[in-house]
Image (cartoon, rainbow, N blue to C red):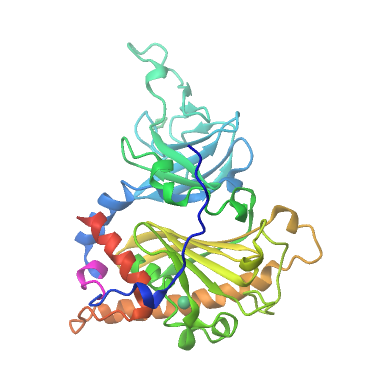
Amino acid sequence: MSQTAVTPAFRKTTEIYRVGAKTLPQRYFVSLEVFGKEQELIFSKQWVLAGHQSQIAKAGDYFVREVARESVIIVRDQRGELHGFYNVCRHRGTRLCEGQFGHSSTIQCPYHAWTYGLDGRLVGAPHMDKVQGFDKAELSLHAVELALWEGFIFVNLADAPTPLEEVFAPLAGKFTHWNLPQLRSAKRIEYDVRANWKLIIENYSECYHCPGVHPALQKLTPYDLAENDLCEGPFLGGFMPITKGHSLTMTGNACALPVGDIKAEDHDRVFYYSVFPNMLLSMHPDFVMVHQLRPQSPERTLIHCDWFFHPEAFDRSDFHPNDAIEFWDMTNKQDWHVCELSQQGIASRAYQPGPYSPRESIPAAWDREYLRRMR
Ligand code: FES
Ligand SMILES: [Fe+2]
């Protein structure tokens, strides 16, 4: 049966306010027990953002990503297929890949040189052929479920996870015109933030703080004009208007070719969505910024921030990626600073959950989704 595309209704943040919404209790930000539960119930069970397909473009390219305290190798094999493997040798368990990124025709253990193909099969094990019952076919690397959404690589540590297409069904086709699978990152900055990962997402999800914290951003996207089309559940967000003719860059000018076939009305909008649990997707007409959160402890979060552009933008004279990168690096650091201050205050014995304002409906909705997952 064919489905007719329906233009989603956008609602002002204040219209979706639920009376009585409050911030989370202290333990959610400081307790090791809660952190462990999050690793178990969320990061070991959900589809977790790990990267973008362009970051392992060629056969043999790989990167290593930590998910729920597990090290996972994500690699492209000779046939172009992507695989995820636990970074654990089948001989005596040794960590196989030490670096974060690399390129290799095989995966070889640094200990006794057992060698695996890029598809995970054990292809070489010195002096093991005389061992009784030894069968290479039974000693492939342990696979991790991996799936693509709009070119982004997600991994799932669960044994039989709900297929990604099913989980991401509410987003099916929604961002097609943003060309996300084709984009390429021009820059990654890694931030080490002394704050709980949820504070980063709650901060991202509202602009109530923008007038005081982000004077430059506030001039280009007035804080009070957010409209949301995803208001409950694992995917949340919407857009904010950008002052006509401007872009979110240091100069205020567009810094690259449009990333895709952007609709006329979206040329003056920036779309912000959180994708549960660890992706923040910020789509501007001329670039897409993605934050990937990697919780390290209750009080510490590593954040990978990538700036993606149209692949054809790179060779043109009107390509000024630093204009966007500098703008958002400045804005990111302003955010991390207030998140760190929040962490410090929340750790106090004086902290109690405080009332969310009607302009913080999205962080309140995110908290509800988080609590549903933690049950
Ligand atoms: S532990 Fe890997 S080859 Fe021995
Ligand atoms: Fe902010």
Q: Which residue is pictured at 42% across the width and 82% down the height?
A: 208
Q: In the image shown, does 170 or 306 lie closer to the viewer?
A: 170
Residue 28 covered by magenta stretch? yes
Q: In the image shown, does 341 or 307 lie closer to the viewer?
A: 307
In the picture, measured across the screen, residue 91 lies left or right of residue 63, that is: left
Image quadrant where residue 261 sits: bottom right
Q: Residue furthest right?
A: 317
- Predominant SS along the magenta part: loop
Q: In the image shown, does 175 or 372 lie closer to the viewer?
A: 175
Where does residue 279 sit, x and y in percent of width and height?
45, 58
Where does residue 358 sit, x and y in percent of width and height?
34, 80
Residue 189 covered by magenta stretch? no
Where does residue 338 sit, x and y in percent of width and height?
40, 80
In the picture, measured across the screen, residue 200 lies left or right of residue 222, that is: left
Looking at the image, residue 283 lies above or below residue 169: below
Looking at the image, residue 136 lies above or below residue 213: above
Q: Which residue is pictured at 69% across the width and 80% down the height?
A: 251
Residue interval drawn in magenta: 22-29
Q: Which residue is pictured at 32% across the width and 35% down the height?
A: 160
Q: Which residue is pictured at 25% across the width and 75% down the height?
A: 21
- Regarding residue 100, the answer to whether it shows in the image is no
Quadrant (top left/top right/bottom left/bottom right) for the C terminus? bottom left
